[in-house]
Image: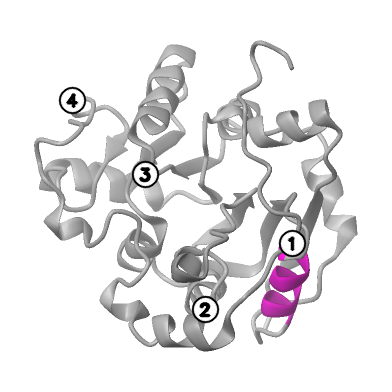
Amino acid sequence: MSPTTPMYRVGPGHFETDEARLQKALERYHEGKGLIGGDPRRRPRWLHPLPPEPARAFRLHQSSPEHLQRLQTFLHHRPLEIEIGSGRGDFILDWAARHPRRHFLAFEVKYKLMRRIVLKAEKQGLGNLWATDDDARYDLPRLLPPASVSVFHILFPDPWWKPKHQARRLFVPPFVDVLGLLLEPGGILRVATDVPGYGDYIVELVEGHPDFLPHDPALAERFADAAPTSRQAFCDEIGRPYTYYFFAKRSS
């Protein structure tokens, strides 16, 4: 294992969904069921202070009104791409550097990793990237209008193996609704997973949604020069297979 490649757990060799338990959890989805860390409005202000404003990091319920206005001005730029679960930021930092005319928003709930992204972006002079350790499921419907996102990148999302944690999975029907609402016509949902069975679940869920076209492998060409995430690099080193999926939003 390369000294620069983080160690990850591989997890079980199968992926299961307890439909009855998941449905019961989803009935409380709009109450915040499954949010990482719980209701962000109750987040202690002293916990993990953000880099001082005007650094390009925010929390929806802790940043100042002036800072949130700076964020809104940034988010009005098109095209806008969003990564959910940025980890160490290996992909999003490189992608933002390659595409200076696009704007990027990185969601990473682990504070230390989010802070790493912000500091590296500042060091590299990337004025086109903001980051937050808020939960994307809470923020996105409150931050953005419909049809405002060009690409969503959700690369190697946590499968949340335990049945009691199923509601924490990103790929559940209510959140796919949000992705479909916020993507512009022709926009792309780009997904990757190395979890056996999770890809099939994602394909069934997304392709069954009226906003999305079936997975189109030809769309991979648009991202041919994208840097790998740290999880992908880990899989490459241990020879673990993974799959990318590309779903375009319908034009009408």
Residue where numbered disc 4 is placed:
52
Residue sitting nearer the eye, 143 or 70: 143
- The local secondary structure at tag 2 comes to helix
Residues tagged 3 and 1 counted as in contact (Cβ below 8 A): no
Mark 1 vs mark 4: in front: 1
Q: Mark 2 points at which residue?
A: 177
Spot occupied by residue 80 in the image (x, y as percentages of width and height): 52, 50
Horizontally, is 35 left or right of 40 in the view?
Answer: right
Image point 61% across, 55% down: which residue?
151
- Placement of 56 over or under 17, stated as above or below: above
Q: State yes or no: discs 1 and 2 in contact (Cβ < 8 Å).
A: no
Residue 107 lies, in percent from the top left, at 43, 46
Q: Name the residue under label 3.
A: 74
Tell me, yes or no, whether the highlighted magenta stretch contains residue 199: yes
Residue 114 picture location, percent across and down: 39, 33
Q: What stretch is highlighted in magenta?
A: 198-207
The residue under label 4 is which amino acid type? Answer: Pro
Q: Which mark is residue 14?
A: 1
What element does badge 1 sit on? loop
* Disc with the residue nearer the chain's start (1 vs 2): 1
Spatial CA span between label 1 and label 4: 43 Å
